[in-house]
């Protein structure tokens, strides 16, 4: 699960196209800088996409919090995993995860 519903999932993917790398220990700042270095028009294009789809813009921090909330909401019965070498659950990888 990426979002609570399809609208949230699309919003989160548009705002955080690097969402999978967040679970690998990279920060929003690092990933955002790399993305913008490669795609300097990212913010404008993201905003145009969200507007065209009628979706409300949210900050990268808010998107990250929502992504984590979805992962936590499914635990303990189902913990989403990221495609890395160790297949660690999100809750173990996000430093600001639940206590």
Image (tube, helix red, strand yellow):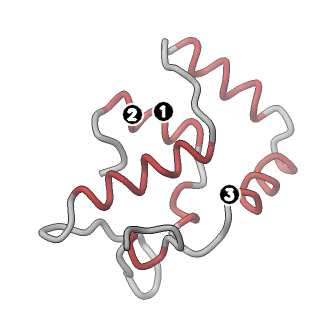
Horizontal side of 1 relative to 18 (left or right) equals: left
Q: What is the x, y in percent for residue 30? A: 76, 62
Q: Which of pointers 1 and 3 lies earlier in the amino acid sequence?
A: 1
Q: Which residue is mark 2?
A: 8
The reply to whether discs 1 and 2 touch (Cβ–Cβ < 8 Å) is yes
Q: What is the x, y in percent for residue 38? A: 83, 49
Residue at x 54% of width, y 42% of height: 62
Q: Is residue 32 above or below residue 83?
A: above
Q: Residue furthest front?
A: 99
Q: What is the x, y in percent for residue 45? A: 71, 26
Q: Which residue is mark 3?
A: 28
In the figure, residue 24 lies in which quadrant?
bottom right
Q: Secondary structure at mark 1?
A: helix
CA distance for labels 1 and 2: 5 Å
Residue at x 87% of width, y 50% of height: 37
Horizontal side of 39 relative to 48 (left or right) equals: right
Q: Secondary structure at mark 3?
A: helix
Q: Which residue is mark 1?
A: 11
Q: Is residue 11 above or below residue 66?
A: above
Q: Secondary structure at mark 2?
A: helix
């Amino acid at each position: 699960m990426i979002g609570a519903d399809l609208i949230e999932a699309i919003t989160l993917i548009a705002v955080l196209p690097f969402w999978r790398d967040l679970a690998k220990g990279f920060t929003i700042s690092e990933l955002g800088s790399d993305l913008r270095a490669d795609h300097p028009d990212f913010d404008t294009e993201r905003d145009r996409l969200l507007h065209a789809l009628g979706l409300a813009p949210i900050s990268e921090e808010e998107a990250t919090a929502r992504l984590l909330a979805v992962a936590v909401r499914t635990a303990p019965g189902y913990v989403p995993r990221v495609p890395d070498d160790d297949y660690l659950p999100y809750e173990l990888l996000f430093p600001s995860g639940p206590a």
